[in-house]
Amino acid sequence: MEAAKHAGEALESAKDADDLANIACCLVIFAALAARRLDGERAALLLGASRRVYRDIELMVEPSEQVLLEDAARRIRDLLDDEERQAAELAGAALGTAQAVEVALRPAS
């Protein structure tokens, strides 16, 4: 998938530059890609991680990213029940940034 390739390159660059704002944005992209592949657990995990990074750096989500985030969240709600979704999002929020990047860059199963 071309989008995943480009998102991976962007995430690698953001990681190398320790650019937390772009890491958070890339995690949203990877969450959206997982949701579109119907991998709700991975999507919720990455969405939880991205929200935590945004909170940690006290950055508001850009409007264009917000649309993608909301779409991913809606798809996740369609894929998982509330308990599964909340557990995966909390697990994602508990990941360190480096761990979240590693999960995002890991090939989807």
Image (cartoon, rainbow, N blue to C red):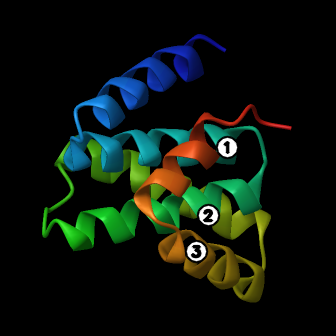
Q: Residue at x 74, y 31 (%)?
A: 107
Identify the image quadrant of residue 50.
bottom left
* Location of residue 36 in the rendering, given as x and y in whole percent from the top left corner: 68, 40
Could you tell whether 64 is left or right of 90 in the image?
left
Q: Earlier in the sequence, mark 1 or mark 2?
A: 1
Q: Quadrant of the C terminus?
A: top right
The residue singled out by tag 3 in the image is 89
* Location of residue 31 in the rendering, given as x and y in whole percent from the top left corner: 56, 48
Above or below residue 105? Residue 35 is below
Above or below residue 68? Residue 52 is below
Could you tell whether 43 is left or right of 108 in the image?
left
Mark 1 or mark 2: which is in front? 2
- Residue kind at label 3, given as amino acid type: Glu
Camera-side residue of 63 and 2 = 2
Could you give the CA–CA distance between mark 3 and mark 1, rounded to whole angstroms? 14 Å
* Location of residue 80 in the rendering, given as x and y in whole percent from the top left corner: 77, 71
The residue singled out by tag 2 in the image is 45
Disc 2, SS:
helix
> Is the Cβ of the residue at disc 3 closer than 8 Å to that at disc 1?
no
Could you give the CA–CA distance between mark 2 and mark 3, rounded to whole angstroms? 5 Å
> Is the Cβ of the residue at disc 2 closer than 8 Å to that at disc 3?
yes
The residue singled out by tag 1 in the image is 34
Could you give the CA–CA distance between mark 1 and mark 2, rounded to whole angstroms? 10 Å
Identify the image quadrant of residue 26.
top left
Q: Quadrant of the N terminus?
A: top right
Camera-side residue of 71 and 62 = 62
Disc 1, SS:
helix
- Residue kind at label 1, given as amino acid type: Ala
> Is the Cβ of the residue at disc 1 closer than 8 Å to that at disc 2?
no
The 10 Å Cα crowd at callout 2, few under 14, some 14 to 19, many 20 or more, is many
Camera-side residue of 99 and 71 = 99
Q: Earlier in the sequence, mark 3 or mark 1?
A: 1
